[in-house]
Image (cartoon, helix red, strand yellow):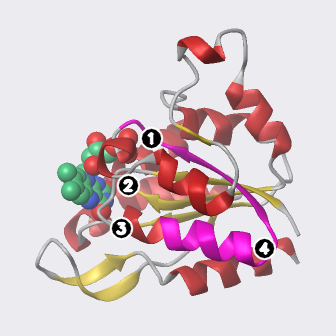
Amino acid sequence: MARIVLGAAASVAVYKSVDLASKLTQAGHSVRTVLTPRAAKLISPQLFAAVTGEPASVDEFSSERRGAMDHIELATWAELMLVAPCSAGLTARLALGLAEDLVSTVALALPAGRPRLVSPAMNPHMLASAPVQRNLATLRADGWTVIEPGAGHMACGVDGKGRLPDPAELVQAVERALR
Ligand SMILES: Cc1cc2nc3c(=O)[nH]c(=O)nc-3n(C[C@H](O)[C@H](O)[C@H](O)COP(=O)(O)O)c2cc1C
């Protein structure tokens, strides 16, 4: 059973992350969720806190967190980090080491050797674009496990590759990484 930081970006697929957080918790893991500020506009952190029984964070600058350094605390606590869904924007920040939100900052502060997995989800044209492919290649070279997106009909109305895999598949990817 592992301590997992689940990062989530502002993708339409973020609704699946609640089920993912729930399934990981039911499998016995402790799951702390970190949402990007834009993800928190699409879905409430409170829902993640409710299904995991653990705090869910968005930023570390709120007045009640004064003096705390959530990015260090979360990165030290985590035995594995999974970013699902990862937007094109967050993919770029992770690849560049741009610590501009709590998810990308925790990723940078994660000690070497801890498994890190990223599950990109986006429109097929965005996924196939040169910058996104370049950034995913960088993440692989940096030691991230990039979970292959699924193909099918997308919420944006087109068919192609870019879907977030089903939560059960993501749980399996986590279990594999922990072994
Ligand atoms: C409803 C909605 C759904 C979106 N879905 C995606 C998506 O699946 N993948 C993606 O890369 N961007 C998507 N976007 C665009 C991102 O939200 C946008 O690029 C944003 O800046 C990403 O912020 P973040 O990376 O900080 O979470 C979506 C935007 C909206 C409004």
Contact (Cβ within 8 Å) of mark 3 with mark 2: no
**In this rendering, which labeled residue sits more in front, label 4 or label 1?**
1
Q: Rounded to the nearest whole Å, what is the CA distance between mark 2 and mark 4?
A: 22 Å
Say if 155 sits above or below 69 in the image.
below
Mark 2 sits on what residue?
Answer: 87
> Which residue lies at the image location 71% right of the left edge and 69% below the top edge?
25
Residue sitting nearer the eye, 116 or 5: 5
Mark 4 sits on what residue?
Answer: 177
Q: Rounded to the nearest whole Å, what is the CA distance between mark 1 and mark 3?
A: 14 Å
Q: Rounded to the nearest whole Å, what is the CA distance between mark 4 and mark 1?
A: 24 Å
Label 2 beta carbon within 8 A of ligand 1: yes
> Which residue lies at the image location 33% right of the left edge and 88% below the top edge?
151
Q: Rounded to the nearest whole Å, what is the CA distance between mark 1 and mark 2?
A: 10 Å
N-terminal of the pair, mark 4 or mark 1, is: 1
Neighbour class for label 1 at 10 Å: few (<14), some, many (≥20)?
many
Q: Amino acid at mark 2?
A: Ser
Contact (Cβ within 8 Å) of mark 1 with mark 2: yes
Contact (Cβ within 8 Å) of mark 1 with mark 3: no
> Which residue lies at the image location 56% right of the left edge and 40% below the top edge?
103
Mark 3 sits on what residue?
Answer: 13
